[in-house]
Amino acid sequence: MPALLKIILRRVALGLLTLLLVSVLVFAATQAMPGDTASAILGRAATPERLAVLREQLGLNRPIATQYFTWLGGIVRGDPGNSLVGTEEPVMQLLGPRIVNTAALVVAAAFWSFPLSILIGSLSGLFRDRSFDSSVSVGSLALAALPEFVLGLVLILLLAVQVLHVFPAVSMVNPQLSIWSQMHNLWLPAITLGLACVPYIVRMLRGSMIEVLESEYVQMARLKGMRERVVLQRHALPNAIIPLIQVIALNLAWLAGGVVTVEYLFNYPGIGSALVDAVRNRDVPLIQAIVLLIAAVYVFLNLTADILTILISPRLRTGLR
Amino acid sequence: MSDQEGKSSFDLGKLGEIAGSKRITRRAVVQGAAAAGALAALGPFAAACGSSEPDTSASPSAAAPKKGGHIRSAIGGGTTKDILDPHRTYYDSGSKTVIVWDALMGWDQEHKLVNKLAESYEINADATVHTFRLKPDLTFHDGSPVTADAVVYSYQRILDPEMAALGAGGLTELKPSGIEKIDDLTVSFNLTQPNAVFVEAVAYYANAIVPVGFTTPNGAEGAIGTGPWKPISYDPGLQTEFVANPDYWGEGPYADKLTMIEFADPEPQLNALLSGSVDHLANLATSQVGIVSSTPGLKVLEAKGGGWNPFTMLIDKKPFDDVRVRQAFRLIIDRQQVIDQGKGGFGRVANDMYAPYDPGYPKDLPQRVQDLEQAKSLLKQAGYDNDLSVVLNCTTSTMLDDPDAAQVFSEQLNGAGVKCTVNKVDPDVYWNEGNYRSYPFAMSNWGTSNYLYLTRQVLFPTGPYYETHWKDAEWEKIVLEAFQTSDDAKRNELVSQAETIEYERGGHINYQFGSMLDAYTDKLGGLVPDNFGQSGATYQRYHLFYFV
C-alpha cells in the first residue's frame, strides 16, 4: 500500500519537524526564565564568586547557540546528555525508572477508565434522554468541570484521610524497588487520573452513538426488520468505534501530559515530578528530554490514530487506492 | 524576650482561625512549588547543628528510650539537584548531610557551643591561633580513624575555591597554609587576622570533617562521615535511607533505620502524616497547624528559633540615608500584627536587633512599639510631610522569604502616611548575584547565629550579604576590638555596645524571631525543640527519636 506508506512517511517527517520546533521553543523558554542553573542551585547563597565558579563548571558561560547545538547534536546521536545538576547523571539513567513509573500510572488509569467510559457512553447514547442518560450527563459535566488536582484532593479526603482509609494518601514509592512490587501506591493517582478522562470519553461516545443510531443505514437496517441486537452489533457499534480511536488517542496523549499535576499532588515519582524539579533547577537537558518525550507521545499517538482510522473506515481505505 | 515567649503558644482560638482559613486552591498548589524552591535556599542560614550531649531529662518520658524501629520522616524541598556533600550543602535542601557528618564543634538545642568531634579547644591571647584536639578513638563509618590528617584535608577542601564551599565565607582569616597539623589528633588554625569567635565558624555544620581523599559521592556509596546515620540508598529528590551508626560517638541513635522522604508540596506532605504513612514531618506550615492539632495521635512541636526575616534599608540611599527616616519606619511597624497576619501568629516580637542567643545580646533595651505620632514628627524633621513614597522589594516565595509580612508592613506604612508599594521579585532574580543588596528597601532572612559571626557576612562591605550598606566608624572600632578580644566577658560587653549602636541607627527592621514547627505521631518520643530554628523544629536530631 504505497499510498499509505507515503502518508505515514509524510506524517513522520512532519512529526519530527514538530519536535524540532518544540525543542527550540523550550530552549528559548528556559533561556528567557529569570536566573540560571547556577542561581537556582545556590538560591540564597548566590554570591558572585560562587556563581562564577558554578557557571564555569556547568558550562553556562558558553554562547547560547553553542549550548543548543551541542545538545541537538547529542539528541541526533540518541544521547540526550547529562543532567546539569547533582552528580550530573546521564538524563536517560535519571529518567528511566521515572518513565516506567509514569507509564504504569497511565496504563493503570487507562485500563479501568477507558472500557468503563466506553460502556457508559454507549449505553447513554442508546438510552438517550432516559433517566440513565440524564444522570450520566449531569455527572460527567460535573466531573469535567473539576480540575484533576481538586478531584485528587477530594479523593484523598474521602478515601485516604478523613472518611475511609482504603488507600495511601500519597504514593511513597520506594525508588529502590520496582513499581510493580508496590502497586498500592498506584491506586489513588490512577483513580484520579482515570476519572479525569471519563467525562470526555463518555460524552464523545454518547454523541457518536446517537449520530450512528440516527444514521440512514441504521434506520434502513431497522426497517429491514433486523433485530435490535444485530443492528447494534453489526451496524451501529463498528461505525461508532471510528471516532473512538481518535478519542482514545487524544485521551492517552492527555494522560501523558496531565500526569504532571497528579504526580505532583500524590508526590508520585514519575516524569511529571521530574519535570517540576527540572524546571525549578533550570536543568535544561532534563527539561528538554521530558518535554520532547511528552511531545513525541502526542505525535506518535495522533499518527497511530490517523492510520488506524484510515485502515478501518471503508471510505478512506478505498480512497487510498 | 522572655515576656514574649508565651505569645506563640498554641492558642486554640487561633488554631480555629487557621483551620478555617485553609482552602484548597490551585494557587496553594502553585505556591507550594515556589515554597519548595525556597527551601532549597536554606543553606546559608543554617548556622550549625548541635548534637546534644546525653540529655534525657529534656524528653517528655523519663524512662530509658526504647531501641529499634524505623523512623519515616517527610521532609520538603529536595530535588534531583541534591548531592550528599557536607561542604556544598546548598545542594542538599533537606539537610541530610548534617546527620551523616559532624563538624569539630556544634551548637546544642539552646544554641550554646558544644564540642562535637573536638575534645578540646584553645585560643591564644591575641586570637590568631586556634587549636583543636580531636576526641580519641573516633571512627568514620567505614571504620577508619578520625585523625588530624582528615581535619587538614577537610579544611583544605573547604577553602578550595573550586568547591565554592558554603562554609568558606566564615573562614576569611584562614588560608590553606595556616592549617597546621600538630600531632595525630591536634590541628592548629593560624589566622591572618585575629578572630576571637573563629570557633563559631568551626561549629558551622557545613565545615564538617570528611575522610582524607573524600570526593562528592555518587549516591550513598562513599558518603562516609562520623554522624549518627549511615546512608544506604540515596535517590535525589525522592528519598534517602539510613541505618543507625552503632559506633556513633554521641547519644543514640535509638531507632535502627531512618527514611527521609522528599515532598515537593506541603499538601501531600501533610497527607502522608495524616494517613500514617510517615511518623514525622519537618517544617510544618503554619496554615496546617490546626489540622494536625485537631487530629488524635498527632502532635506539634514548636522551636523558638533565633532566625529572623528583617526589612533592610540601605543607609546610603534616599530616604534611608537619614537616620530619622529609619527610626520612623521602626516606629511605624506594628510587630505583633505582622507576626499575626504575616506569620500565622508564630514568632516572638523582636527589638530590631538580632542574635538573641548571643551572650552579649542587649536584653534590657526598651522594646520598641508602634508610635505613629513620633514617627510622623521624625519624618517631618527629615523633610517629609506625608509625601514620602517607597517601594518594598521582596521575593514571591512564601516558605522562607516573606511576601505576606511585606504586605502587612506596607499597609501599616500607608496608614502612617508613607506611600508604600510592594514589589515581588522571583527568588532566582532576587538573590542572584546579591541583587537584593541594591534595593533601597527590601527583605532578607537569616537563621540563628551569634552576632560577630554575622557581622562578617552582613555588616562589613567585604561580606557577601552586605544588605544595609552599613558604615559606622564608632561601631567598626568596637567590633574590630571585639574580634581581637579572647576574654568572653569583655567581648560580650563590646557585642552589647555594637548591637546598641544598631538599635539606635542601624538599617535593619527586625520585627520577630521565627518559630519552626514539626508534626509527629505520639508514638515517637525524644523530640526536643532546637533554638537553631531552621530545617525543622528539632533540626534533624533523629538519633534522639525513639518509639514509645
Image (cartoon, coloured by chain):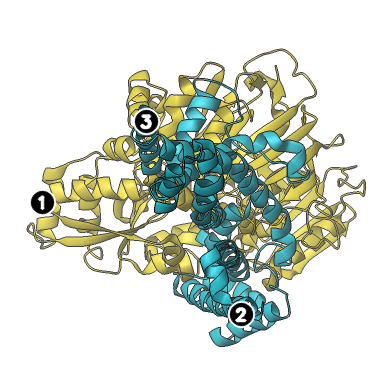
**Same chain, marks 1 and 2?**
no
Give the cyan chain's letter.
A
Which residue is nearer to you in this view: A222 or B254? Answer: A222
- Tag in front: 1 or 2: 2
Badge 1 local density, few (<14 within 10 Å), some, or many (20+)? some
| Image disc number at residue A135 | 3
- Regarding mark 2 in the picture, which secondary structure is present there? helix
Q: Position of residue A150 (x, y in %)?
A: 42, 39
State which quarter of the image contains the C terminus of chain B: top right
Q: Amino acid at mark 2?
A: Ala
Q: CA distance from mark 1 to mark 2?
A: 87 Å
- Regarding mark 1 in the picture, which secondary structure is present there? helix
Give the yellow chain's letter.
B
What residue is shown at x 86% (from left), y 34% (from top)?
Answer: B246
Badge 2 local density, few (<14 within 10 Å), some, or many (20+)? few
Please tell me in which quadrant of the rendered image residue B334 appears: top left
Q: CA distance from mark 3 to mark 2?
A: 46 Å
